[in-house]
Each structure stands twice: as structure tokens, then as C-alpha cells.
Image: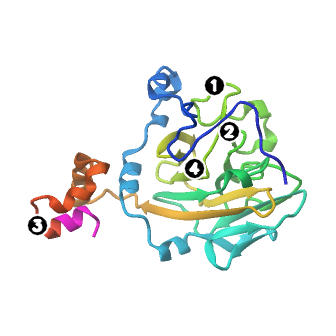
Amino acid sequence: MGQKISGGIKSVDGRGESGGSPSYRPLAHRRQHPVLRDPDFSKPPRLDLLLDMPCAGHETQLRHAWNPDDRSLNIFIKEEDKLTFHRHPVAQSTDCIRGRVGYTRGLHVWKIHWPSRQRGTHAVVGVATSEAPLHSVGYTALVGSDCESWGWDLGRNRLYHDSKNRAHSSLPTYPCFLEPEESFTLPDSLLVILDMDEGTLSFMVDGQYLGVAFRGLKGKKLYPVVSAVWGHCEISMKYINGLDPEPLPLMDLCRRAARLALGRDRLQEIESLPLPQSLKNYLQYQ
């Protein structure tokens, strides 16, 4: 079901390292790149706030999981793990599945776990309308192939939208800081960030925000989607959390400011602060 793409590829371990040769260029180097001064590369404050919140509970994750009624017939949801699907080893076939929930407003983040050894030649992650096709004969990057979906090819580091009507050379490279012909292999997990209030789709890897991949998504109803070609691949989706477009209460903003002042490494010290227990509980989302 396709083979891994090679040639000039660097790998990333869980710490974003690869034997002293990081896939991501050091920050000092990146500042020299004119694209990286663009606002599209700055992590939105609302995303920081969302990621500081506790993850959604299991019941919420199940409500936002893969949809067993909106999939290629070559895919099935695992009985023992409703957040994971399995693809049958069908030759010359590309298969997709959408999530249960379509988003029209708010900021939403979900985690895709897709083992790199199970990606093959065409592994694409993104979002789609309800009209996007879920199956194609042959091996192809189905997500992003038409105007109903938007996808990131994890092997080629290209962004696809209506790609069947565009020259391959015109498809943008992503992340934008990659030089021509430069590439890297992603770790097994990544975050997908859909901001329907701003109309953007972005991605994060190992805590690093990779910038805006797509704009112009306002006014649509979009579902999580992947397209796969690897036989027996298993791909999980875990909904992290969401934020409504309304302004946050002042109490929530104060909690965020206090947690930022402490720093992530010192959050466990909240219990030792000279504060009422109710306030300490609030700072810990309890």
C-alpha cells in the first residue's frame, strides 16, 4: 500500500531531536527567514489558552470521534477503541473517514496519532465538507484533491486544496520555513488546529506551532478527515478541547495570567502558595 518517501528526510523524536540534528531549524536561524516574521507564524493567544486547559473528558472525545457512518467501506472503527479506525489491506485504493462533528464556529484542537511506519506514500490530514469524496481507486492524496477539502501531505510536506486542478509545482510547501527540497519526517502524533472564527487551519508538532496552513474557511462546516493507503494502518483522533468565540470571563483570563507567571514547570507548586484552597483549586482547573 505504498512505501515511505525518502531522500533528504530528517526524523524527530519525542523531544524534537534527532541525534543532534534537529528537524526544525533553530529559532535564531528561523528569524532570518522573512516568511517567519509574518503574523501567520505567530501562535494565537487563544490557542495558548486552550492548550493550558485540561483535555476534554472521554465522553466528549467520543462525541468528536471518527464517524462509523461517514467512511470508506475499507475502514472500520475498532470495537475496543472508538477513537481509532483500522484500514483493511485493499490494494490500489485510497480511503477516508470524517469525524462525527462538523465545526462552524469556535477554536477546536484535536490530536492525530498516526504511526509513521503506517503512512505509506499518501498520508494526508486535514478537514473536509460533507461533500468531499471518501474513496478513490489507486493511491492518491484524496484529501485536498478537490475544492471540498484541505489537507497536509505528511510525507511530501505539501498543502493540497483542489490539487487535481493545479500543477504540483504550485502546491505550497508546509511548514513554510522549509527550504526547497528540504523535508523532515514527523513524529507519530500531531495537533490539528481549526479556528472557524478566523477561518484558518494550522498544525503543531512536539509543542511547536507550524503556522497557518490554510485561510478562507469561514462560513463553512468542516469535519476532521484523513486519507490513507497503508494496509492495516490504525489512526486515532483525540479531541483536545474547544473555545467558543465569545470573550473569556475575566476570572479565566486572570487564571491564565497566574499560570503563565508560574511557568509550566512550577504548576505543581500551586498547592504550596499562601492562597485560599478554593482559589488554588481554581488555578488547577479543579
Disc 1 crowd rating (10 Å Cα; few below 14, some 14-19, many 20+) is few
Instruction: Tell me: 219 left or right of 271.
Output: right
Q: How many numbered marks does the figure carry? A: 4
Type of the residue with mark 3: Pro
**Image point 67% across, 65% down: which residue?**
98
Q: From mark 2 to mark 3, how far is it between C-alphas?
A: 50 Å
Range shown magenta = 280-286
Disc 3 crowd rating (10 Å Cα; few below 14, some 14-19, many 20+) is few
Which residue is identified by label 3?
276
Marks 2 and 3 close (CB-CB < 8 Å): no
Q: Position of residue 102 (x, y in %)?
A: 58, 65
Q: From mark 4 to mark 3, how far is it between C-alphas?
A: 45 Å
Type of the residue with mark 2: Asn
**Colour scheme of the rendered structure:** rainbow
Residue nearest the observer in this picture, 114 or 150:
114
Marks 2 and 4 close (CB-CB < 8 Å): no
Marks 4 and 1 close (CB-CB < 8 Å): no
Which residue is identified by label 2?
157
Type of the residue with mark 1: Glu
Q: Position of residue 243 (x, y in %)?
A: 41, 60
Q: Please tell me in which quadrant of the rendered image residue 162 appears.
A: top right
The circle drawn on residue 14 is none
Which residue is identified by label 4?
217
Mark closest to the chain's N terminus, 2 or 1: 2
Mark closest to the chain's N terminus, 3 or 1: 1
Q: Quadrant of the C terminus?
A: bottom left
Which residue is identified by label 1?
179
**Secondary element type, mark 3:** loop
Q: From mark 2 to mark 4, how far is it between C-alphas?
A: 21 Å
Q: Is residue 111 above or below residue 26?
A: below
